[in-house]
Amino acid sequence: LFGKADSYEKLEKLGEGSYATVYKGKSKVNGKLVALKVIRLQEEEGTPFTAIREASLLKGLKHSNIVLLHDIIHTKETLTLVFEYVHTDLCQYMDRHPGGLHPDNVKLFLYQLLRGLSYIHQRYILHRDLKPQNLLISDTGELKLADFGLARAKSVPSHTYSNEVVTLWYRPPDVLLGSTDYSTCLDMWGVGCIFIEMIQGVAAFPGMKDIQDQLERIFLVLGTPCEDTWPGVHSLPHFKPGEEHIHQHTHTLGPTVRIRLDSSSTL
């Protein structure tokens, strides 16, 4: 019966994205709750590449800290990915527990996040979109990595990856500056940002405008990079040292260099 659209019953809409709608559903075979990610197919465009990538990667992943892909249903109009149902995510969980999580819960979630990441990194897969919304939390406190639409297998020796990855707040500075040569450290920057957010209850670097603003928030805390502190930073595609700019900010570490993105930036 698996693999057929009528094997599942839609219950309610959970969310909608640019190319997919997610529903809470129930299996008619065993009565278990599922999450149905319904991807709309346009005849002229075919199946969105992100959906193909997510399905192909998740099919080979079986781990308690990775969301489980039960089934794939393909019809003329839609591609449906059937996942185990997990009732909330870390973003919603932190909203319900403002001001920072209890240290024991921070340890529990961080351990599971690192364990799930270790599993995919050992298989040469980068997630590339770590953020609280993509970390599902079960009613027993189990954390699961989800939404592998931006993930990709890290092939060797290719080092040309897109720099249009990772939601801005959780994106590392080398990628913000145009680097496409990255590895597992891309995901580990996101882990650090999420760790801080769990402790203090607010995002570590909540850029409000653009990449420029995001970089300045990072540099205000960590200092503006130079060749001495970050060898090779001047060679990054969008690094353009400009005039020194002193921020009137209570946490400034002194004069910082305003970084200009060159006009070829596509971010």
Image (cartoon, rainbow, N blue to C red):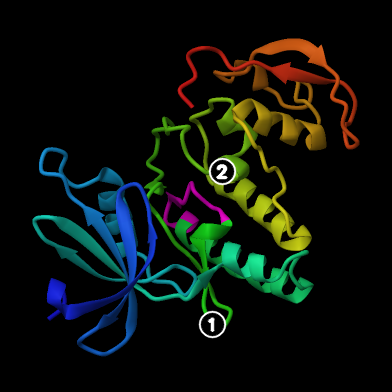
Crowd rating for badge 2 (residues with CA inside 10 Å; few <14, some 14–19, many 20+): many
Q: CA distance from mark 2 to mark 1?
A: 29 Å
Which residue is depicted at the point 81% across and 30% down? Answer: 223
Residue 68 at x, y = what percent? 37, 71
Q: Which residues are magenta?
A: 121-131
Q: Which mark is residue 102?
A: none
Which residue is depicted at the point 70% across and 74% down? Answer: 105
Which residue is depicted at the point 61% across and 49% down? Answer: 190
* Foreground residue among 125 and 157: 125
Q: Return the residue found at the far front.
A: 12
Left/right of residue 103 with respect to residue 267 in the rendered view: right
Q: Quadrant of residue 231?
A: top right
> Residue 23 in magenta?
no
> Label 2 sits on what residue type?
Leu
Residue 264 at x, y = what percent? 47, 14
Residue 43 at x, y = what percent? 10, 43
- Disc 1: which residue: 139
Q: Quadrant of residue 218?
A: top right
On the question of residue 227 being in view, the answer is no
* Closer mark to the observer between disc 2 and disc 1: 1
Residue 107 at x, y = what percent? 71, 70
Q: Quadrant of the N terminus?
A: bottom left
- Disc 2: which residue: 186
> Residue 130 in magenta?
yes
Left/right of residue 232 with respect to residue 162 in the rendered view: right
Left/right of residue 186 with respect to residue 61 in the rendered view: right
> Which SS class for mark 2?
helix
